[in-house]
Amino acid sequence: MPIRTRAQKTGDKGQNYVRELVDGHPNWMCRAQDLDYGVDLEAEYAPAEGEMQRPAGKLLKLQVKATEVADIRDQVVHVSLERSFLHYAQQFRLPVILVHVDTATKSAWWLWLQAWSLENEDRLALSPDSASITVHIPLHQSLEAGLDHQLVDVVSGIHVSAMVLALRELVDVAASDSRHIRLFRGVLALLDEMEAPNRLRSAEKIIELLVSLGSNPGLWQTSSLIPQIIATVERLGDMFTKEQILRLVLREDSYSRAGLEGLATLYDRWPARAKEMQLPSAFHDAGAEQVSWYCSAREHYTHLGGYELVMGFEAGKLPVAHFGNLQLLHDDDLAYRLFSKYPTRGNSVLLDNLRWVGGTDPERSDTT
């Protein structure tokens, strides 16, 4: 026989209270979600016109979390939230509002989950595997007051966080298609005016896209990302970390040609930052001797850009070509190979022409 638990009764009370509160407001309408797979209600901004309302097509999603006794300490409402739902809320294009209800006192507070996630990215990154997380809602952030003022800004898209989230979505769209490079550059320029976390997130998006192609994708797959990689490093290279550069370039026991173009751009645009990272040693320690050679060459010929370095070796004007255990293979055909292959292979054409001259060649060593 079906039963109704106390928790279900509390949840129903909370949801009914929120629906009545929102729908009773002169500037809002509220709709129940017939298929509740995680979001309980939908609120639409509908400004009053005399005794009527005019729906504006501006929507919020409301997730109600009710309790019999709210956990209030130090003027803050503490609410435990499942991490999976927070991730789910981040996928919405519409604002998702957590509404916490104390059914005993008939009090309700609100929190915009996407904006909270944006402001707490560092905290979330520290515990990526936690099943739940506690969010803190200021006691003064009541639902009644929010419907009058702050939530109007949220639903209208004029809140600062709304602008950042919209720009991030544009980055996600433009990052995956080189045909949108002008849009991508423009959005990066706008994000560049925001706080550091928003800039770094753009860099992470590009790295994720490149890594998602696998350990050894074809050049035709990665080449579509090269314009975005270059644009990102040109704009945000001063904020890249050593770990991000390694992730951008390395692929298991090899390297990404597209990622190497990002590395070349780092040396072109941010040479001091690149040198600070001690990249020759970093790539050597990672077992990427070819990339380590490239970094050493860039730091030796600091006055040359990536293209000038290749053409300098092609013309035989750069005498030092031995760095670490590798040396550029000088033979009668080197100039032809560099000149003819550069248009399709870019800076990695140098790495294709290295030979092992010191220590033990790992590709030729015996394994047991």
Image (tube, rainbow, N blue to C red):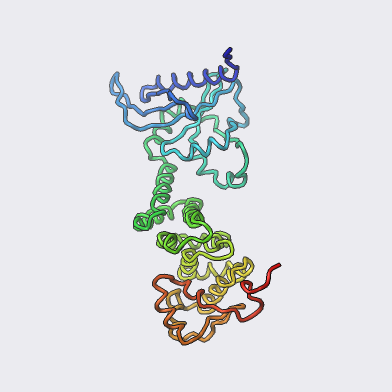
Q: Could you tell me residue 215's position as x and y percent?
A: 53, 59
Q: Quadrant of residue 296?
A: bottom right
Q: Nearer the viewer, residue 69 or 81?
A: 81
Q: Quadrant of residue 365?
A: bottom right
Q: Quadrant of residue 47?
A: top left
Q: Nearer the viewer, residue 265 or 75?
A: 265
Q: Could you tell me residue 1's position as x and y percent?
A: 58, 12
Residue 284, compared with residue 85, is above or below; it is below
Q: Could you tell me residue 196's position as x and y percent?
A: 50, 53
Residue 40, compared with residue 210, is above or below; it is above
Q: Nearer the viewer, residue 12 or 112?
A: 12
Q: Is residue 26 left or right of residue 241?
A: left
Please identify the quadrant where the C terminus is shown: bottom right
Residue 243, compared with residue 14, is above or below; it is below
Residue depicted at x 54% and y 72%: 295
Q: Could you tell me residue 258's position as x and y percent?
A: 46, 64
Most extreme residue toward the right is 368
